[in-house]
Image (cartoon, grey):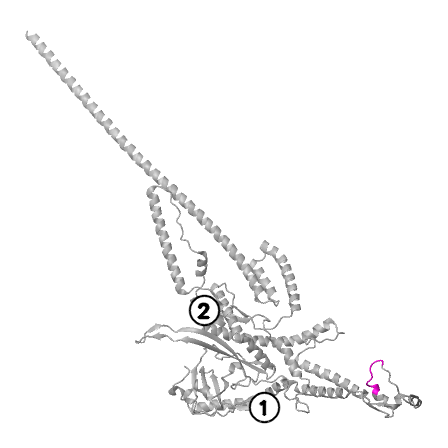
Amino acid sequence: MFLMDKEDVKTTNDEVERYAEDIKLSEKRDEDWCEDGKHAIKTFRNGESKNSKGEKSNSFNILWANVETLEPSLYSQIPKPDIRRRFRQEDILGRHVSKVLEDASAYCLEEYGMDNAMESAVHDMLLPGRAVTRIKYKAEITPAEVDDNDNETSPAKVESEEIKLVPWDWDKILLGPAESWEDLPWLAFIHHLDKAQVKDFAKEFADKISYDIASDMSDAKTDKTERIDDRATIYEIWCKEDRKVRWYAQGYKDSFIKIEDDPLSLKKFWPMPKPLYSIKSTTSMVPLTEYSQYEALATTLNTVVVRERRISDSLRVRGVYDNTLAELDKLFDAGDNKMIPAENLSRLIENGGIEKAIWMFPNKALVEVLLQLRVYRRDLVQQIYEITGISDIMRGQSDPYETLGAQKMKGSYGSQRLQKRQRAVQKYAKDILKLVVEIIGEKFSIESLAGITGLKFPREAEKQQFEAQQRMLQQQAEQQAMMAQQQAQQSGQEVQPPQQPQVDPEQMRFMSLPTWEDLKGVMEQDLARSYMIDIETDSTVLADQNADQESLTLLLGGVSQYVQGVMPAVESGMITKDAATALLKSIVSRFRLGREVEEAIENSVNEQGAQQQQQQQAQQAAQQQQQAEQQAEQARQEAESEAKAAENQANQAKYAHEERIRQMDAQAKQVEHQNTMRELQLKGQLTEARAQQDMQKLRMTNEQG
C-alpha cells in the first residue's frame, strides 16, 4: 500500500498543478498570521527586549505572565475517559464493551503522549492561536507463513500496536479553501525530509526531486554553524473527496511521489480533531493570535516599565558642598552614633549653618513622576486583564479593603470567561479521545485489547467447548436418572431425584461473560451511534480543594435530606425505587465528583436488585426442590398404590378362580347327587315294578291254583 507502481503514481500534470496552486494560495492566505504567530512566540521568549549592551533586558513580559497563568488553568492532567451506552439500556454486552474501551483508551492516553499533546496544544492556542494534534497508528505484524504450494501454514500475527498522539507544529499544516471545518476539502501536513528519508517511502523519486532547504545546526557555545544535509519540502495531502493521501514534492510537478488509500479508515477521514483555536470565527479558518489583541497595550506597558527602572536608577543621594569643609566627605561614610570633629565650626554656624554649605539634588520631581508611572502601569495591566479575562483574584491578588462578595464577584466574572476556554480545551481532548477509541475499535486485535486492559473474557472456541462439555454431562445425568428410575420401579424402592452435574461456580461465572469475539464485533460497528464517548467533567484541570470540600459537604447534606424525604414515599408506593434513584443521580450529577459516585449509586441499586433476584432464585430453587420432592413422594405413593391395586387385583382374581372352582365342585356334587337320587329312584321304581310283577304272578298263580 505504501509504495505505488508506476502506473498507480502516474497522474496528469493538471491535477498536480492544481494542488500545487491550492497550496500556494493557502500559504499566501496564512502568511500574515504566521508572521503574527512568530512574533508572539518571540515576544513570549523575550527575544526582542535588549539593553544597550545587546543583552536581553528584564522588561515586563506581560505575555509570558498571562500564558503561564492561563496554561495550568486550562489543562493540568490527562482526562479520564467516560464511555457509556448512549441510551443507558440494560445491556450486559454493551456494559462490558464500555469497560474495555474505557480501560484501553485510558492506557493509550497515558502511554502514547496525551499529556504532552495537550500541553503543546494549549501552549499553541495561547501563542500563535491554533493548535494541531495528529493521530498515528502503528502495528508490527508478522506475515503469514506459506509452503512451496502457497498454502498458508500459519496465519499472520500482530506483535504490537500503538497509537501516537503527535503535537504538530502550528506552521507545518495547511488547510484547503473553506469557511468551516465541516466543509474542508483537503489538508496538508508539511514535511522537510532529506534524501534518505525520502528513499524510505518513495525510493524511485529520491533522485528526481529538489532539496532546496538548507538546514543549519547552530552551536550556542561556540556560535558556529554546521551544515547538515539539505532537505526537500514534501506535502502530505489528505483529500476527503476520494479518501486518498497524496504526497507532493515542492517543485516536482510530473506526478505525485506517492499515493495511498485511506490508512486509518476513520469515519470523518481526518487523522486529527478540529484544530483548537484561541479566537473563533464563523467566516474564516485563518487563526488570530491573542497577543495581537493587546499588543499595543503590552508595548506601552513595556515602555512604562523601562522608564520606571531608569528613573529608579537615577534616584540617588547626590549634592555639592564647600570644599573647605573636608569633614562633610567623611560624614556620609560615618557609621551609627559616630561623631566627626570639625575645624572652624563656629564660623560655619555664623554663616547660616551647615545647610547653607550643602546643596542636594532635587529627587522630589523624579519621585512624583515615578509614582504616576506606577499608577499608569497598574491601569495598563488592568486593561490587559480585561481583554484576556484574567481577574486579579485569579492571580492571587486582591485589595485587603474589598469585601468577600466583591472578590467572589470579580472571580466569578473571570471564571465565566475561563470556563468557556476550559470547555473548548475539554472538547478538544474529547475529540482526540473519539479518534483514539475509533482506532481501538477498528484496528486493535483481541490479543492487544486483552494485554493492555488486563480484563478476562472467554474466547469463542473456549465457550463452545465448555457448552459442549456441559451438554454431554447433562445427557449423562439424564441417562443415569432414567436408569435409576427404572431400577427403582423394578425393585419397588423409592425413586431418588436426579443429581445435577457439579460445575465450578467461578468457571460458570466466567463462561457466562460475553466472548472477546462478541465484544470485538460490537466495537467494529458504529461506536459513535451506540455509545457516548466523553471525558469526566473537569478531569483536565486540577480541582480547587476548598471548593471540592464545600461541594462535598453540600452534596452529603442534600443526599441525606433527600433520602429522609423520599424513603417514606418509596415505602408507601407513591414513588418507585427506579424513579427515586433517577432523581438522586440527577442531584449528584450537578456536583463535580466525577463518574465514580454515579456508578456507585447504580452499582448499589444493581446489587440490591441482584440480591433480590438471588433471593427470588433461591426461593424458586427451594420451591422447585420442594416440588421435586413432592412429585417424587407422589410418584412413590402412586407406585405403591398401583402395586397394591395390582396385588388386590391378583388376589381378587385368585379368589374368583377359587370360587369358580368351589362352585364347579358344588355343581359337580349336586349333579352327582341328582344322578344318585335318580339312580335310587330308578332302582326303587324297578324294585317296585318287580314287586308288582311278582305280586301279579302270585295272584295269577293263586288264581290258577
Q: Position of residue 135 (x, y in %)?
A: 50, 78
Left or right side of 533 for 624: left
Are discs 1 and 2 less than 8 Å apart at CB?
no
User: Distance between the Cα atoms at labels 1 and 2?
Assistant: 60 Å
Label number found at residue 395: none
Quadrant position of the N terminus in the picture: bottom left
SS assignment at label 2? helix
**Local crowd size for mark 2, using a 10 Å CA cut-off: few (<14), some (14–19), many (≥20):** some
Q: Amino acid at mark 2?
A: Val
Find disc 1 in the rendering and name its residue. 223
User: On the rendered structure, is 693 left or right of 74?
Assistant: left
Examine the image and state in which quarter residue 423 appears: bottom right
Which quadrant is the C terminus positioned in?
top left
Q: Nearer the viewer, residue 476 or 430?
A: 476
Q: Nearer the viewer, residue 519 or 580?
A: 519
Residue at the left extreme of this rendering: 704
Which of the numbered marks, if any, corresponds to residue 522?
Answer: 2
Residue in front for this viewpoint, 318 or 547: 318
Which residue occupies 62% across, 72% down?
Answer: 542
Residue 35 lies left or right of residue 703; in this view the side is: right
In the image, is residue 668 above or below residue 700?
below
Q: Which residues are magenta?
A: 330-337
